[in-house]
Amino acid sequence: MSPDPAAAAGVPIYLSAGRSAVPTPRSVRCPKCDAALPATAGFRAGRRVTCPSCDAPIVVPDTGEPEPDPARGRPRRSRRAEDEDDRPPRRRDGSRSTGRGDARGRRESGDRRLKGNVYVRVGTLAVLLTTLGVLSWLLYRKVERDREAAAFNQEMEKGAAPVLDYTAPPPKAAAAPFNRLVPEGLDARAHEAHVAVARRLVGRWDSTSQESPDVRMEFGEDGLVKQFYKDADGKLSPRTPERWKVIVVAGDGGTVEFWESGRTRRLEFRLEDGGDRLVFVGTRLGDVGYQRQK
């Protein structure tokens, strides 16, 4: 058989179907893997085929209208081909879908998605309401516990014995100038004992010790003590005043504290001769005595 001159010239092959023909391309290229599919029997334009290389679906393209046949007049497409074009596209399983069924399926799918969204929203709202309820209950319980604790504390304070305040000195006008000379926080009896000893120390005292014969001390009610030393000419030169306070009382003696610019000294003392003689005990010079000056 001699080859078809139309095929040799690259003209598309037409398969006859009744009185008309449907153009059939010689080959089709896969849009996915670019493989060439050769024309076979039943390889008609508009038909869906599967790529043998990648299994991708391919629609055979229409190469155009067939050439007119002089013997038959104007070519017409077969009714079967027209019916093929008018039919809905095939599904992957080979069956054709109708427009009515597809619309119903889309509606059912939309209804299912809507129901799913409603369930998700209702669940989220229920979780939020539950969380708010738990937090509100915890806050309410905390407020109730605080109220109960406050009421209990008030009841205990009403039934408790009164607390004596020893931080302030006794309200005696006569002892007011001497309150700064004793520590704070003493009870009434200890405060009076400290004030009595501090009163006896207030005044001017000259040293009677041979180790430091030229020393004078003045204890003031303002809490300052001044020391004076005699120079070579016999004149008294004052030193920087220090603050003093009686911190321990034991009979006619006790412990006095001196401090100035962060330097603190504590000396034990005793009063003799009815309070006219002051003796500092255990200093680095031993026992140092002072005589009261009238």
Image: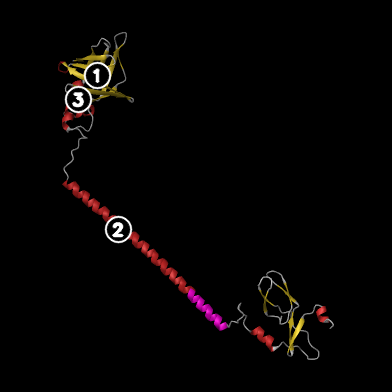
Crowdedness near tag 2: few (<14), some (14–19) or many (≥20) residues, C-alpha within 10 Å: few
Identify the residue at the far top of this view. 233
Q: Which residue is mark 2?
A: 140
- Which residue is drawn at the image coordinates 42% and 66% (left, top)? 124
Q: Circles 1 and 3: CB distance less than 8 Å? A: no
- Mark 1 against mark 3, which lies toward the viewer? 3
- Which residue is drawn at the image coordinates 40% and 67% (left, top)? 125
On screen, 241 above or below 110? Answer: above
Q: Residue 83 is drawn in which quadrant? A: bottom right
Amino acid identity at mark 2: Tyr
Could you say whether the residue bearing mark 1 is in a helix, strand or loop? strand
Range of magenta residues:
99-112
- Which residue is drawn at the image coordinates 51% and 76% (left, top)? 109
Residue 100 is inside the magenta segment: yes
Could you say whether the residue bearing mark 3 is in a helix, strand or loop? strand
Identify the residue at the far left of this view. 274
Q: CA distance from mark 3 to mark 2?
A: 58 Å
Q: Which residue is mark 3?
A: 249
Total numbered circles? 3
Q: Between disc 1 and disc 3, whose residue precedes?
A: 1
Quadrant of the snapshot with the N terminus: bottom right
Q: Which residue is mark 1?
A: 218
Quadrant of the snapshot with the C terminus: top left
